[in-house]
Image (spheres, helix red, strand yellow):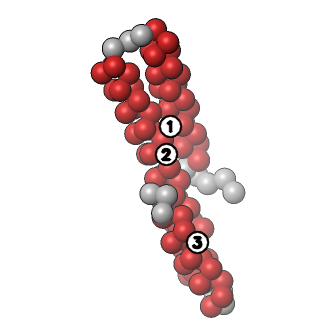
Amino acid sequence: MIHESHPEILKRLKRALGHLQKVINMMEEGSPCIEVAQQMHAVEKAVSSAKRTMIHDHIDHCVESSITDESDLKNRKHSIMECKNITKFL
């Protein structure tokens, strides 16, 4: 399912990919460790931000709507369990 936030998430992931390629190039070139670590930090932040946005979007649009809809108790429990499961990745 494609959500409104997915294009922005893809943009962030592509940015992270660029940072990661830079890290690889820097390591191959023997760049100073502090500079490599700084770029690695940028990769982590970009991926973390994309992941958090995707998870929050999923909760907002998928889990919340299935809980508030006129669904039966079994579906609601499943949605709550799904929410608990996905939040472990935050």
The one nearer the camera, 59 or 36, is 36
Identify the amino acid type marked 3. Glu
Q: Look at discs 2 and 3 and give the one toward the viewer.
A: 3
Look at the numbered disc 3 and give the secondary structure of its residue: helix
- Residue lying at the far right of the rendered structure: 1
Q: Of the residues under marks 1 and 2, which one precedes in the sequence? A: 1
Q: Of the residues under marks 3 and 1, which one precedes in the sequence? A: 1
Note whether residue 40 is visible.
yes
- Tell me the residue at 48%/52% (across/down): 53
Q: Look at discs 3 and 1 and give the one toward the viewer.
A: 3
Note whether residue 69 is visible.
no
Please state the horizontal and vertical placement of residue 88, each as a whole percent of the image: 48, 63
The reply, left or right, for residue 55 in relation to residue 76 is: left
- Which quadrant holds the C terminus? bottom left
- Tell me the residue at 39%/26% (across/down): 39
- Measured along the vertical axis of the image, is residue 25 above or below residue 70? above
Disc 1 + disc 2, Cβ < 8 Å: yes
- Dot 1, crowdedness within 10 Å: few (<14), some or many (≥20)? many
Please state the horizontal and vertical placement of residue 75, each as a whole percent of the image: 66, 83
Look at the numbered disc 2 and give the secondary structure of its residue: helix
Identify the amino acid type marked 2. Ala
Q: Which mark is residue 12?
A: 1
Q: Which residue is mark 2?
A: 50
Calculate the distance from the C-alpha at mark 3 to the C-alpha at mark 1: 25 Å
Corner quadrant of residue 9 = top right
- Residue lying at the far left of the rendered structure: 34
- Which quadrant holds the N terminus? bottom right
Q: Which residue is mark 3?
A: 82
Calculate the distance from the C-alpha at mark 1 to the C-alpha at mark 2: 6 Å
- Tell me the residue at 54%/68% (across/down): 85
